[in-house]
Image: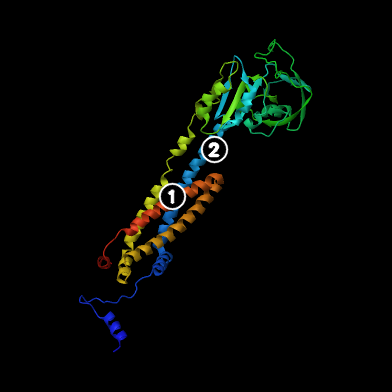
């Protein structure tokens, strides 16, 4: 007998305990991965039921959370359009410097600023001398403040006034002082300046825009805006600020807009009422913000239940020589394939529902992706812990079956 024959015989010789000294390699990693994917594909009704439950668990709260965020965004936009984050600086004694007001946009956090002065005496049209149109002199920054294009030397009409006079952007008009009636003020305008900004422009004007002027308050929203140079002083300075800069601007503007040593008085455009809400706090404190973590925990518990139902497979794999690391690898691969499919389906389904509901893509995409990603990662971490939990010894499992 050759040496090789003796070695092979020794390898097959039984040990003292009745076992074998056969040291042939066991389950390879590739085999374990293939077996995990095969279990996912051939899981039949249990895998299908688990996938449906997980898709519903991912989709329903993701849609509800995104819809809540969308409503907050709509409310905040309405608040901003009505004057949220808008400060008004006034100075009854000396007025507000127009140039300083216009230059506020050079500061961090200031999105737009414009100075406004209402003429006490209204204007009339040459073609309609009986009209009495309130006129407000504004600096060029009013275009950014109202969100309209550059107005140049043109006139900006309130929506109601434009409809009444049947004027549209591009039409021309000529102004004349309105006839003084019994209710017209006599003498010069209060706070009149030597810069001549309260005089009506001569010649023909072009209508630059017809828009809603309610942002400027009741006293300045029902008539016409005329642009003037940033010289002299004005009645008020309107400043729109970016989020997070309101308090700092409220503290700094009195000194920045002071005139003749008198600081300006700064107030909020909106005071309380239905608009008094902290949208940032509402967003951070919404009920479903942390829901993905709870969904991930629930998904991991479902996977533990599935492992218990399929504990017979654990015993079968153990008897076939699959050790604990191999069985753990198979379960993790099966879970990753399942949760990856569920996450993709949840993103597609949630996105379709929200887009059909009219939610903007800019809101839908980041919130749905965040929700599904957090739920997927947290559930996968939980599934990994579940895979590490031993159920029963192989013989005990097979006896139960």
Residue 50 in the figure: left or right of residue 194: left
Q: Quadrant of the N terminus?
A: bottom left
Please tell me which residue is depicted at 53% across the width and 46% down the height of the picture: 364
Query: Residue 336 location in percent, x, y?
Result: 42, 59
Query: Residue 103 location in percent, x, y?
Result: 62, 27
Above or below, 305 relative to 112 = below
Numbered disc in front, either 1 or 2:
1
Question: Disc 1 marks which residue?
Answer: 374
Secondary structure beneath label 2: helix
Q: Residues within 10 Å of mark 2 (few under 14, many from 20)?
A: few
Quadrant in which residue 31 is drawn = bottom left
Residue 197 in the figure: left or right of residue 80: right
Please tell me which residue is depicted at 30% across the width and 67% down the height of the picture: 315
Check residue 74 in the rendering and tell me which mark sits there, or answer none. 2
Query: Residue 113 location in percent, x, y?
Result: 61, 28
Secondary structure beneath label 1: helix
């Amino acid at each position: 007998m050759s040496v090789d024959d003796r070695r092979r015989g020794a390898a097959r010789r039984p040990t003292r305990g009745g076992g074998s000294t056969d040291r042939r390699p066991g389950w390879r990693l590739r085999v374990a991965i293939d077996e995990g994917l095969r279990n996912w594909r051939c899981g039949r009704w249990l895998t299908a039921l688990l996938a449906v439950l997980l898709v519903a668990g991912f989709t329903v709260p993701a849609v509800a959370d995104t819809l809540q965020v969308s409503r907050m965004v709509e409310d905040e936009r309405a608040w901003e359009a009505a004057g949220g984050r808008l400060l008004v600086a006034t100075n009854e004694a000396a007025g507000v410097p127009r140039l300083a007001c216009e230059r506020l946009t050079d500061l961090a956090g200031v999105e737009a600023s414009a100075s406004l002065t209402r003429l006490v005496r209204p204007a009339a049209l040459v073609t309609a001398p009986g009209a009495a149109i309130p006129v407000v002199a504004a600096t060029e920054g009013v275009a950014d403040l109202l969100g309209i294009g550059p107005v140049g030397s043109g006139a900006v009409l309130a929506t109601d006034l434009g409809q009444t006079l049947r004027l549209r952007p591009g039409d021309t008009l000529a102004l004349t002082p309105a006839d003084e009636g019994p209710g017209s003020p006599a003498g010069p305008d209060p706070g009149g300046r030597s810069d001549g900004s309260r005089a009506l422009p001569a010649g023909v004007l072009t209508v630059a825009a017809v828009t809603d002027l309610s942002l400027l308050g009741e006293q300045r929203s029902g008539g016409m805006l005329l642009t003037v140079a940033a010289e002299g002083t004005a009645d008020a300075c309107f400043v729109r600020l970016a989020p997070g800069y309101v308090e700092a601007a409220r503290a700094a503007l009195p000194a920045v807009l002071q005139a003749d040593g008198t600081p300006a008085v700064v107030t909020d455009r909106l005071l309380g009422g239905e608009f008094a809400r902290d949208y940032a706090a509402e967003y951070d404190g919404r009920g479903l913000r942390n829901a993905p973590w709870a969904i991930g925990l629930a998904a991991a518990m479902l996977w533990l239940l599935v492992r218990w139902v399929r504990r017979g497979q654990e015993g079968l794999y153990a008897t076939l020589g699959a050790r604990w690391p191999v069985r753990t690898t198979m379960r993790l691969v099966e879970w990753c394939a399942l949760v990856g499919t569920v996450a993709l389906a949840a993103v597609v389904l949630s996105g379709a529902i929200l887009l059909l509901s009219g939610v903007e893509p800019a809101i839908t995409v980041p919130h749905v992706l965040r929700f599904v990603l957090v739920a997927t990662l947290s559930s996968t971490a939980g599934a990994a812990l579940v895979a590490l939990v031993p159920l029963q010894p192989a013989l005990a499992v097979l006896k139960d079956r």
